[in-house]
């Protein structure tokens, strides 16, 4: 099983622009405050991370020309007995190439620039982040249609929340719901696929309606391109604490009905993976752009009140710049889920029943889990 790596397509012009920022304050409001230097520093670190697959939209000849220019600057500096005047962009390119040579960066020189006006409906694009030189209007159209993050200089301030974590602390009996937990802090991001792991999430029909429906409403995009299918996979035990199985088809149809009611205009596929209780411990949600954990589980609320004292934490696993563990947590989660996903057989009443340890109901497709292979 390989390691999940975030795919990034970066226009070389975007990189030059963001690295020319001089530290003026961004227009951040409320509890989020950052300078453009912080955002630029975050991008710099992301582009040299061993946890990404970086596609630089530049030809090999242009790539080589950058380093020839740096070498010429160094020769001139030696001749004039001074330090070479290396720009921030050139320093970044030196870092990228150094990491590549050390085998610590998965770098691809991508001469064919990705055209955001053309179709992006391919998995290699749908799990990617784009740093683009396109206009804000073109970037927003791509995000709305394909559930991806596309950042340009014009809209970079709209994504300031990505470098922060977003959490909420809940006390038992406190009034709240999932929409408050997942949306009011601005963590909603474009997405096109979803994986939820919780052994107990589908144990109670009333809880499914109160909890899962609110989670889905907070996460699912309002609309997507008709050419795109939003892929949803739920991992759960589908049995009570005594091991007595629930009616799997009934649970599947209830979830399907909720999604159709919430987002009637979105094409989606649903898969429920019935797995044994020891496959997962933590309760986790992942989309292609967010990672959410809750110690108390996703069946947390009953009649509008928290049933446990717990915390909910949500963050973008690759932009979140306060701890390197977030990359690993996301990768480990997807790799574990992918392994269970591959092991699970389609449900067939003629040769297995609800007590069978591992099976799937629905369309066994999820681009997040496919990419984790």
Image: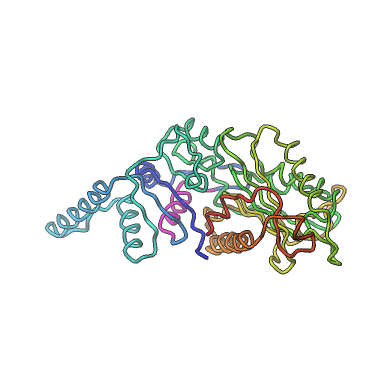
Q: Which residues are magenta?
A: 34-49
Judge whether residue 36 is colored magenta: yes
Judging depth in this view, the residue of 124 and 74 nearest the camera is 124
Judge whether residue 22 is colored magenta: no
Outermost residue, bottom direction? 278
Residue 66 in percent (x, y) is at 25, 50
Judging depth in this view, the residue of 336 and 45 nearest the camera is 336
Figure quadrant of residue 307: bottom right
Outermost residue, top direction? 137
220 to the left or right of 305: left
359 to the left or right of 369: right
319 to the left or right of 266: left
Judging depth in this view, the residue of 231 and 246 nearest the camera is 246
Residue 344 in percent (x, y) is at 66, 60
Figure quadrant of residue 49: bottom left
139 to the left or right of 355: left
What's the residue at 63%, 47% (across, down)?
A: 31
From the image, give the main secondary structure of the stretch colored magenta.
Answer: helix
């Amino acid at each position: 099983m390989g390691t999940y790596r975030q795919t990034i397509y970066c226009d070389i012009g975007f990189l030059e622009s963001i690295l020319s920022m001089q530290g003026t304050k961004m227009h951040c409001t409320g509890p989020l405050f950052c300078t453009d230097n912080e955002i630029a520093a975050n991008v710099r670190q992301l582009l040299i991370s061993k946890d990404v697959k970086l596609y630089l939209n530049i030809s090999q000849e242009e790539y080589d020309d950058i380093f020839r220019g740096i070498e010429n600057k160094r020769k001139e500096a030696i001749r004039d007995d001074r330090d070479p005047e290396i720009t921030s962009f050139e320093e970044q390119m030196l870092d990228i190439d150094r990491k590549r040579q050390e085998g610590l960066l998965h770098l691809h020189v991508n001469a064919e620039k990705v055209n955001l006006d053309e179709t992006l409906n391919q998995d290699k694009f749908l799990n990617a982040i784009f740093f683009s030189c396109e206009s804000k209007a073109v970037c927003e159209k791509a995000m709305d249609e394909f559930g991806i993050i596309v950042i340009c200089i014009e809209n970079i301030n709209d994504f300031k929340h990505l470098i922060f974590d977003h959490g909420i602390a809940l006390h038992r009996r406190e009034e709240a719901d999932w929409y408050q937990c997942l949306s009011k802090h601005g963590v909603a991001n474009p997405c096109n696929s979803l994986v939820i792991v919780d052994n107990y999430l589908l144990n109670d029909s009333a809880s499914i309606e109160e909890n899962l429906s609110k989670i889905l409403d907070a996460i699912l995009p309002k609309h997507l391109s008709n050419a795109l299918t939003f892929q949803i996979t739920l991992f759960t035990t589908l049995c009570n604490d005594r091991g007595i199985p629930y009616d799997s088809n009934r649970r599947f149809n209830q979830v399907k009905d909720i999604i159709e009611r919430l987002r009637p205009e979105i094409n989606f596929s649903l898969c429920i993976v019935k797995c044994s209780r020891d496959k997962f411990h933590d309760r986790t949600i992942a989309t292609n752009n967010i990672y959410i954990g809750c110690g108390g589980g996703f069946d947390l609320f009953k009649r509008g009140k928290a049933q446990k004292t717990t915390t909910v934490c949500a963050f973008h696993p690759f932009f979140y710049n306060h701890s390197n563990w977030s990359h690993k947590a996301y990768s480990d989660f997807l790799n574990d889920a992918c392994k269970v996903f591959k092991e699970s057989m389609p449900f067939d009443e003629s040769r297995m029943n609800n007590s069978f340890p591992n099976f799937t109901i629905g369309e066994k497709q999820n681009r997040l889990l496919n990419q984790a292979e």
